[in-house]
Every structure is written in structure tokens, then in C-alpha cells.
């Protein structure tokens, strides 16, 4: 009788662990992510998410949670872009996680600032903000090296200046409305300030 009770107790003790294992989310499949990147994303972002057209974002090394968030918001039309909405509409949640994990696994390649006249202003804004306009330092959320903070803020370091410029302008104009914090910040910045910080970010590493 004692042995039966012991077995029952052991079974009950093991049950939560089994349930927990069953509830654990599946790990992203990098092979499936690569297939999606090759078949769907490569034309605009390059197969490995590297330095393709300056009009499109570099995805290599980007936090997977951020990529999934953007794809989800494109699919829901919370972030407007006809091309991306069309592609995202065809992706399942698992597809998004797989392709995001694939791009996140790629090593980030360094970029370079090009506008020497604006480097000093860009660095000042990125590291110290614009006090008289109540614009916070970019580094506060995106890290001094532009590495971002996983699950919260995207990696910016090395991003195409043209792409960053376009996004800040979109935030400022209200054309991109999926981040109230960035819209508020960009609304206080001049063309020159946006151009300076965008170019500076391109050279961050």
C-alpha cells in the first residue's frame, strides 16, 4: 500500500513539470525563417538582411521581438505601408517569429556617417538630446552604441541614414503612427536636426 501511495505522490509531483513543458512555446525555426527571407524578403532586404537599398531597413542583428512587432502591426494596418502590409498579411505568427529569429542571428555589419558637417550636431542630439526643445537623448532608449534594448527598443547602430531620416519624418508628419513616444519626439525636431542624427546613427557601432 505504501508503495502505491508513493507512486501516486510522485506522479502528482511530476504533473506540473509535464504541463509546463507542454505549455512552453516552440523555439523559432531558423531554416524556415531563412526560407521566408529568401522567397519573400530578399528582393528588398537582401537574403541576410544586410546593406541593401538605403530606402529599406537593415534587418540583420535586429531584435527579433521588434521585427515581430512591426510585422504584426503591418498585418493589422497599424503601421501603414502597402508593400509590407501585403507581405505581412500572408505570414502566420510562427512565420514572423521564424524570419525574425533568422535575421536576428546575422552578424551586424558596420555602417558609416557621410555628412562631416553634421556629425557634431548628430552626436550631441544622440547622446544629450535637445534640452531647450525637451527632446531626450536617443542613447537613453537605444543604447550609447545604438544596440537598443531587446523587447523594448530597436537596434539603430549602422542603420541606413536614408531609412532613419524617412522614419523620423514619417513620425513627425503623423504618417507613421505606431509609436506615440517617437511621434512626440520627432515633432519637436527640425529638418537639420533629423538629418544630423540620422547620419550619425549610420556610423554608430
Image (spheres, rainbow, N blue to C red):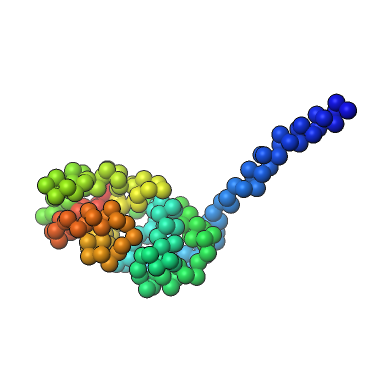
Say left or right for 174 vs 27: left
Residue 172: image location, x then y, percent:
22, 61
Question: Farthest residue in the right direction?
Answer: 1
> Which quadrant of the view contains residue 1?
top right
Q: Is residue 1 above or below residue 159?
A: above
Left or right of residue 123, residue 9 in this image = right
- Count how many numbered circles sit on residues in the image: 0
Percent coordinates x, y for residue 20 in the rendering: 63, 43
Horizontally, is 16 left or right of 137 in the view? Answer: right
- Farthest residue in the top direction? 2
Residue at x-position 30% and y-position 45%: 141
Q: Is residue 95 above or below residue 82?
A: above
Determine the residue positioned at 44% across, 62% down: 72
Q: Quick check: can you spot residue 45?
A: no
Query: Residue 101, percent across and down?
Result: 48, 54
Relative to residue 13, is residue 159 depicted above or below? below
- The residue located at (35%, 70%) in the rendering is 81
Residue 6 x, y percent position in the rendering: 80, 29
Asked if residue 132 can be seen in this view, the reply is: yes
Look at the picture and state if 5 lies above or below 205: above
Residue at horizontal 27 percent and vertical 43 percent from the top: 140
Amino acid at each position: 500500500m505504501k508503495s502505491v501511495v508513493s507512486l501516486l505522490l510522485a506522479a502528482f509531483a511530476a504533473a506540473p513539470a509535464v504541463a509546463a513543458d507542454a505549455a512552453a512555446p516552440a523555439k523559432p525555426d531558423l531554416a524556415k525563417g531563412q526560407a521566408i527571407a529568401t522567397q519573400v524578403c530578399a528582393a528588398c532586404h537582401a537574403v541576410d538582411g544586410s546593406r541593401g537599398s538605403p530606402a529599406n531597413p537593415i534587418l540583420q542583428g535586429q531584435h527579433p521581438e521588434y521585427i515581430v512587432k512591426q510585422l504584426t502591426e503591418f498585418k493589422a494596418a497599424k503601421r501603414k505601408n502597402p508593400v509590407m502590409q501585403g507581405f505581412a498579411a500572408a505570414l502566420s505568427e510562427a512565420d514572423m517569429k521564424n524570419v525574425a529569429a533568422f535575421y536576428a542571428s546575422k552578424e551586424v555589419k558596420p555602417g558609416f556617417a557621410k555628412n562631416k558637417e553634421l556629425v557634431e550636431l548628430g552626436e550631441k542630439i544622440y547622446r544629450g538630446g535637445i534640452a531647450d526643445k525637451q527632446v531626450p537623448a536617443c542613447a537613453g532608449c537605444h543604447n550609447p552604441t545604438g544596440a537598443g534594448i531587446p523587447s523594448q527598443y530597436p537596434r539603430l547602430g549602422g542603420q541606413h541614414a536614408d531609412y532613419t531620416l524617412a522614419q523620423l519624418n514619417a513620425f513627425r508628419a503623423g504618417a507613421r503612427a505606431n509609436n506615440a513616444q517617437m511621434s512626440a519626439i520627432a515633432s519637436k525636431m527640425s529638418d537639420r536636426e533629423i538629418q544630423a542624427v540620422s547620419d550619425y546613427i549610420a556610423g554608430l557601432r
